[in-house]
Amino acid sequence: MQEESGVDIASGSMYFARRNNPIQQRHWKTAESVPSNLLPPGLASSATGKEKLMPIVRPPAVAGLFYPADAFALRAQVHALLAAARPAVDSAPKAVIAPHAGYIYSGPVAATLYARLAPARDRIRRVVLLGPAHRIAFSGLALSSATAFTTPLGDVPLDTAACARLLSLPQVRILDEAHRAEHSLEVQLPFLQEVLTEFTLVPLVVGDTTSEKVSEVIETLWGGDETLIMISSDLSHYHDYATARRLDAATSRAIEALRPQDIQLEDACGRNPVNGLLLSARRHGLHAHTLDLRNSGDTAGPRDRVVGYGAYAFDA
């Protein structure tokens, strides 16, 4: 089995791929091999040439690294993390921010948030998921041409009509390369698959763009109680434990105060999608609450160089 480079699963800051992973190689076809009527709305016209790969199902890139590749082991780990989280309350939030490192590091913090979704497991039917780009640099927000994302727990169908609607915005485009190795969205899916009964996904990798443009995307698909807005972001990176706690506490205060101007890229790798959500939350009169705030020094790593993780809920 061939491997490429290495990765710090506490943050996902470096690329890793198992080239011969059979799960990763599922369902990738050339554009000409895909009938136009099977492509998502608005995508058929972009299928030009054999050299252009058109994914029908986006396979997992970090199964076996950030989380178990075996379905039984993965389900057991997710259930154990959820069982250790605080009891769920009676109502679920409209929007959330969750960390996206390897489960051994950020899983306990993420589970605190996912436990809050339990009351809405049958109500939430669509998840609009935004996370930062770690693998390639680009401008705007990237959708996938896939019709589903898969994990060891099965396929998650995309809301292709909603994706097509977003393509009317100038800051949104199809960019499969942004999704191919990106972990920030993928690591959320097994939790969502276990917590929610049935849902569709709108996956957006966020590149270089403004808070206002991210907020416009969020507003387009805001919807009602059936739609959950989810941002994937870690907090500070590679400071000592005490420094990280101080910086992450300040970022949490900015999130709770809905003050995007106080959050910079060094404060959160998902600064762009986080700040877009803060603008929308302010517009809709939501309140932000910190559910959990820890770092890798609290969960599974040394304390001389840590990554911060926070879980946040937004409700009326």
Image (spheres, rainbow, N blue to C red):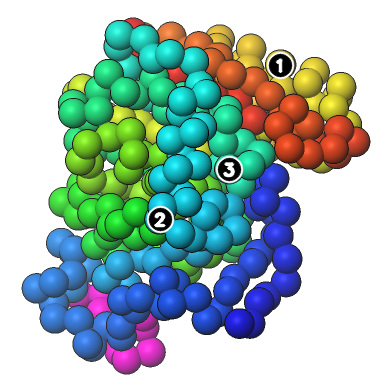
Q: Position of residue 272 (x, y in %)?
A: 55, 38
CA neighbours of label 3 inside 10 A, class few (<14), some (14 to 19), many (20+): many
Dot 3 falls on a residue whose secondary structure is helix
Prevailing secondary structure class for the magenta stretch in the rendered image:
loop
* Residue 71's disc number: 2
CA distance separating discs 3 and 2: 15 Å
Front position in the image: 19 or 265: 19
- Identified at 39% across, 19% down, the residue is 116
Residue matched to label 1: 249
* Mark 1 neighbour density, 10 Å: few (under 14) some (14–19) many (20 or more): some
Q: What number is the disc on residue 130?
A: none
In screen coordinates, is 112 left or right of 90? Answer: right
The residue under label 3 is: 103
Judge whether residue 1 can be spotted in this image.
Answer: yes
**Three-letter residue code for mark 1:** Ala
Magenta region: which residues? 45-53
Q: Nearer the viewer, residue 8 or 44?
A: 8
In the rendered image, residue 46 lying in the magenta stretch gets the answer yes
Q: What's the residue at 58%, 53% (across, down)? A: 66
- The mark nearer the N terminus, 1 or 3, is 3
| Disc 1 versus disc 2: nearer the observer | 2
In the depicted structure, whether residue 131 falls above or below residue 312: below
- Secondary structure under tag 2 reads helix
